[in-house]
Each structure stands twice: as structure tokens, then as C-alpha cells.
Amino acid sequence: QVQLQESGPGLVKPSQTLSLTCTVSGASITTSYYWSWIRQPPGKGLEWMGAIRYDGNIYYKPSLKTHTSISRDTSKNQFSLQLSSVTPEDTAVYYCAGSPNLNTVADRGRYTYWGQGTQVTVSS
């Protein structure tokens, strides 16, 4: 059974960097699939932020590329998200997810695996 678990601070101050990690169990992030970060601000829809492919290639949503960084630690089977210079508009539930193809549309039906999500609030 494949499981994804997000971890990171629940509260970040404006202008700081948000860092989240997704730990994957039951599947290797270096064998197959695209591993994505997706978020949902309060009262809004899902937003795909970026993904790292099993071979290490990285893809970003163009509008977020300048302050988003995705990386991985293959020894721990984890991939991570860093979002710099955050503002209150970055407050959201953040999810990690896995899909066999690159999906830039955050449609739950296109993803095989989802984490439970972690709430991140940007506030001073």
C-alpha cells in the first residue's frame, strides 16, 4: 500500500520560506511516477504547484517558478517543497500526490496517490 505523508511547520511568518516534506512509503520515487505538490487556499480550488519526475526532472507552474523549489532525498524516499517570500495568500492546505503522467491540472481523479494534506498558515 502506497502512502504519502506531508510534514512541516503549520505557521510561517510573511517573507519567510515555507518548507514541506513528503515521505513516500510503499513505492520508490526513483522508479516511476511524477510526484507533485498541490495546494488549496481556503474557499478556493486546488492548484498544482510543481512536480519532480522519477528521474529527477522538475516541473513548475510558471507563475510560481520564481519562488518555488522542489527537491528530493532519494535515501529517505522523500521529496520536498520550498516556497520563498511567502505572503498570507500562500495560506492553504498543502498536499503531495503521485501520478503516472505529468498533470498540471489539479484534478484529484488524475492522481493515483494523495497525502492527507497539511495546513500551512502565513501570519505574523
Image (cartoon, rainbow, N blue to C red):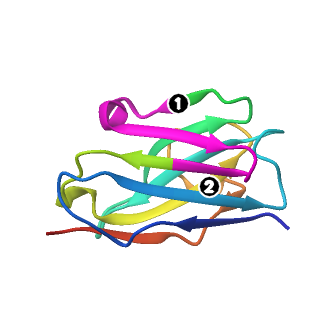
Q: Nearer the viewer, residue 19 or 62?
A: 19
Q: Nearer the viewer, residue 17 or 107?
A: 17
The image shows residue 94 at horizontal and vertical percentages of 45, 62
**For residue 45, which quarter of the picture?**
bottom left
- At a point 56% along the width and 65% down the height, the residue shown is 6
Quadrant location, the C terminus:
bottom left
The image shows residue 29 at horizontal and vertical percentages of 75, 45
Q: Nearer the viewer, residue 93 or 10?
A: 10
For label 2, the crowd category at 10 Å Cα-Cα, with few meaning under 14, some 14 to 19 and many 20 or more, is: many
**For residue 46, which quarter of the picture?**
bottom left
Q: Is residue 95 above or below residue 103?
A: below
Q: Is residue 41 visible?
A: yes
Q: Could you tell me the amino acid type at mark 2?
A: Ala
- At a point 31% along the width and 37% down the height, the residue shown is 67
The image shows residue 64 at horizontal and vertical percentages of 33, 37
- At a point 41% along the width and 47% down the height, the residue shown is 82
Q: Is residue 102 visible?
A: no
Q: Is residue 27 left or right of residue 3?
A: right
Q: Is residue 58 magenta?
A: no
Q: Which residues are magenta?
A: 59-80
The alpha-carbon separation of the residues under discs 1 and 2 comes to 14 Å
The residue labelled by disc 1 is 59
Residue at the front extreme of this rendering: 75
Q: Which mark is residue 97?
A: 2
